[in-house]
Image (cartoon, rainbow, N blue to C red):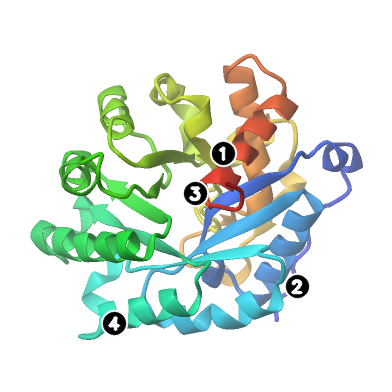
Amino acid sequence: MEEIKTNLQNKENMENFYPIIDSHTHLLDYTESQLEIILENASKANVKHIMNNCCVEADFIKIQPILKKYKDNFILNSYGLHPWWLNQRSPNWLENLREYLEKDPNSQVGEIGLDQLKYDQTSKEEQIEILEKQLELGIELDRVISVHCVRAQPEMQKVFKKYFKDPKKKTVNIIMHSYSGNKEMTKGYLKLNANIYFSLSQGIIRKPEFLQVIPLENILVESDGPYQLCEKEVSDSGLFSEKDFITNQNNLIPKLEKINEPRFCHSLIEFLAKLHNKSRQEIAQIVYTNSLKAFRLIK
């Protein structure tokens, strides 16, 4: 097990971390020792819940020991097939997905979606077919649904209109993961008969123009850990420094120099506070309440 060093000495900042929820992570992509450290860091930084997303069927069983270890819903979980790895699915994938969702009434559906960059591996038509089957299952079981969408917003909106256009049909909570859609796309999502939440990752700090039409009550924050670390943006928040970043020693997670983690969601809270000219405490409370509603932790 590799040695990992991390800096938790900034007591002033730790004391000022308001409660938040990391709405999207991939806990199985950390090494065992990395996971232990990042979850300890999250707890000390007032991250109340972390939503893990399973992406392939093998993840469904792999996540079970972690869910059993951490109590009080500290780790929330989603089951789904990610568009990057649809060609790994078994013939019984839908039955397997249903089984795990039904065994855990608190689990959600995700990470599911569309990705134009992978149409060469799984065609657009096939991605849409699998997405729709997972949406239908999520709607049937009344689960929150976490959605991945890359360069396929028109196709996604067309699918959503099929399921969420009729006001007489039951609505669900939809989490748009790592969202960076343009104004027109955002307006289109907000018109749907669904509770749409836009989960922001650190990259959005570089393009704040995408946030102009998103109501504050529809915003969540996420790390997408261990991925999507934006070192400069996290450091610029004033809440963390270079010493806080964990080096991906021995390249244990391919292509990552340093790893992202849930506590860095606080940098997004700081960014949103400045963007909306509000206090960090006020933004943290708004986003935390949004998250509790989105994941049905409160009514």
**Marks 2 and 1, how far apart at CA:** 37 Å
Toward which corner of the image does residue 40 lie, by quadrant?
A: bottom right
- Horizontal side of 159 relative to 203 (left or right) equals left
Say whether disc 2 or disc 1 marks the residue closer to the N-terminus: 2
What residue does disc 4 label?
Answer: 95
Please name the residue that numbered disc 3 is placed on: 228
Q: Nearer the viewer, residue 165 or 70?
A: 165
In the displayed structure image, the side of residue 161 where residue 178 appears, left or right:
right
**Residue 252: x %, y % from top left:** 55, 72
How dense is the environment of label 3, judged by Cα within 10 Å: few (below 14), some, or many (20 and up)? some
Look at the numbered discs 4 and 1 and tell me whether their residues touch, using CB distance below 8 Å.
no
Counting residues from the N terminus, which is met first, the one under dot 2 or under dot 4?
Answer: 2
Q: Please rate how many residues cluster around mark 4, counting C-alpha atoms within 10 Å: few if below 14, some from 14 to 19, many from 20.
A: few
3D distance between C-alphas at marks 4 and 3: 32 Å
Instruction: Residue at 19%, 42% (x, y): give it.
Output: 161
Q: Which residue was labeled with disc 2?
A: 3
Residue flagged by tag 4: what amino acid is it? Glu
Q: Are marks 4 and 3 in contact (CB under 8 Å)?
A: no
Mark with earlier residue (4, 3): 4
Picture coordinates of residue 253, whole percent (x, y): 52, 68
Whether residue 202 is visible to the viewer of this picture, yes or no, is: yes
Q: Amino acid at mark 1?
A: Asn
Establish if 206 lies above or below 294.
Answer: above
Q: Which element type, helix, strand or loop, lies under badge 4?
A: helix
Circles 3 and 1, Cβ within 8 Å, touching? The answer is no
Q: Does residue 89 appear in this view?
A: no
Left or right: 91, with 250 as reference point: left
Of labels 4 and 1, earlier in sequence is 4
Q: Which residue is mark 1?
A: 290
Q: Earlier in the sequence, mark 2 or mark 3?
A: 2
